[in-house]
Image (cartoon, rainbow, N blue to C red):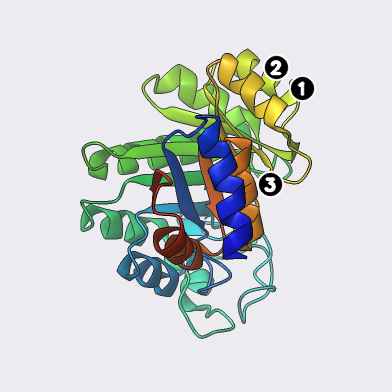
Amino acid sequence: MKRLLTIILLTMLSFGVFAQQRIFAHRGGRAEFDENTMQAFNGAYKAGIRGFEVDIRMTKEGDLVLMHDSSLERTTNARGAVETSKTKVVKNARTLKGNRLVMFDDFVKWIENKGDIKYVEFELKTDPALYSEDLVCKMCDEVYNKIMAVKPAGSTFVITSFDQRPLIYIKLKHSDADLMFITDEPLNDAAIAKVKELGIKRLAAKMPGTSRTAVDKAHLDGIKVTLWPSDNMNDVALGISLGADNICTDIPVEAKKALKDGMKWVQVEF
């Protein structure tokens, strides 16, 4: 594996295509830790990771919690949807590995005490079937105000979504926010056109099927590219070779060690 990565990266180096890239922890590093929990964030941070991605949902009472799925059943001992569950139920739930779910306010406090955090993507899981326009606006304002209050100097905080509504609202209401549209397809012309239509400068796309040509095209339009998913070192090497600005990986600790030990010339920021 190390030999393969070395060949790929040396080939890239010979053509002078390196740029500073970030490899950051998807849900805190879901293949290495218990996703979206303090066990994940603390474990990845202790291992030297300074970039994270988290998912945000709203309980029935309007409190924000870090949770990827709407259903509580895949990862916790509770039942039902986050959006129809009372905050007390969410707080009392435990993951299948025994950890508490993380309320958004607690994650914000964690960031506030980590002044060296470099990069965080805050994904708003505002499925139109579950979130009215009013709820979208409420979530957007709360997330923006709270993260900007603790954002370390020199760090990058990006608010992201598959749903265009929060991106449109935040762009109008909070013009200084860094925003990213997510597509569940490979990087393509339609996705690039959508980001340009939204007037934002970041796009997250699926790594499988994405070409170097598509990444270069996005870059020519001034769009930064995040690629996902990445749950093995082949994916990490592919993301680097495609020229992605950011790689969202489930194995941040493994990736950091492999790149540090075997490929010291790669300009990667974790």
Q: Amino acid at mark 2?
A: Ala
Mark 2 surroundings: few (<14), some (14-19) or many (≥20) residues within 10 A: few
Q: Position of residue 199 (x, y in %)?
A: 55, 15
Residue 207 occupies which quadrant of the picture? top right
- Near-viewer residue (176 or 24): 24
Measured in 3D between alpha carbons, the distance from the residue under mark 1 to the one under mark 3, in whole angstroms, is: 26 Å
- Does 29 sit above or below residue 132? below
At horizontal 61% and vertical 29% (from top left) the residue drawn is: 165
- Does 159 sit above or below residue 2? above
- Does 120 sit above or below residue 179? below
Which mark sits nearer the N-terminus, 1 or 3? 3
Q: Nearer the viewer, mark 2 or mark 3?
A: 2
- Quadrant in which the N terminus appears: bottom right
User: Label 2: which residue?
Assistant: 193
Residue 83 occupies which quadrant of the picture? bottom right
At horizontal 40% and vertical 19% (from top left) the residue drawn is: 175
Q: Residue 2: which disc?
A: none
Q: Amino acid at mark 1?
A: Ala
User: Which secondary structure lies at badge 1?
Assistant: helix
Measured in 3D between alpha carbons, the distance from the residue under mark 2 to the one under mark 3, in whole angstroms, is: 27 Å
- Regarding residue 181, the answer to whether it shows in the image is yes
User: Label 1: which residue?
Assistant: 190
The answer to whether the residue labelled 2 contacts the one labelled 1, judged by CB atoms less than 8 Å apart, is yes
At horizontal 58% and vertical 70% (from top left) the residue drawn is: 31
Measured in 3D between alpha carbons, the distance from the residue under mark 2 to the one under mark 1, in whole angstroms, is: 5 Å
Q: Position of residue 151 (x, y in %)?
A: 27, 42
Q: Is residue 124 left or right of residue 110?
A: right
Which mark sits nearer the N-terminus, 2 or 3? 3
Q: Position of residue 20 (x, y in %)?
A: 41, 37
User: Label 3: which residue?
Assistant: 130
Mark 1 surroundings: few (<14), some (14-19) or many (≥20) residues within 10 A: few
At horizontal 68% and vertical 31% (from top left) the residue drawn is: 212
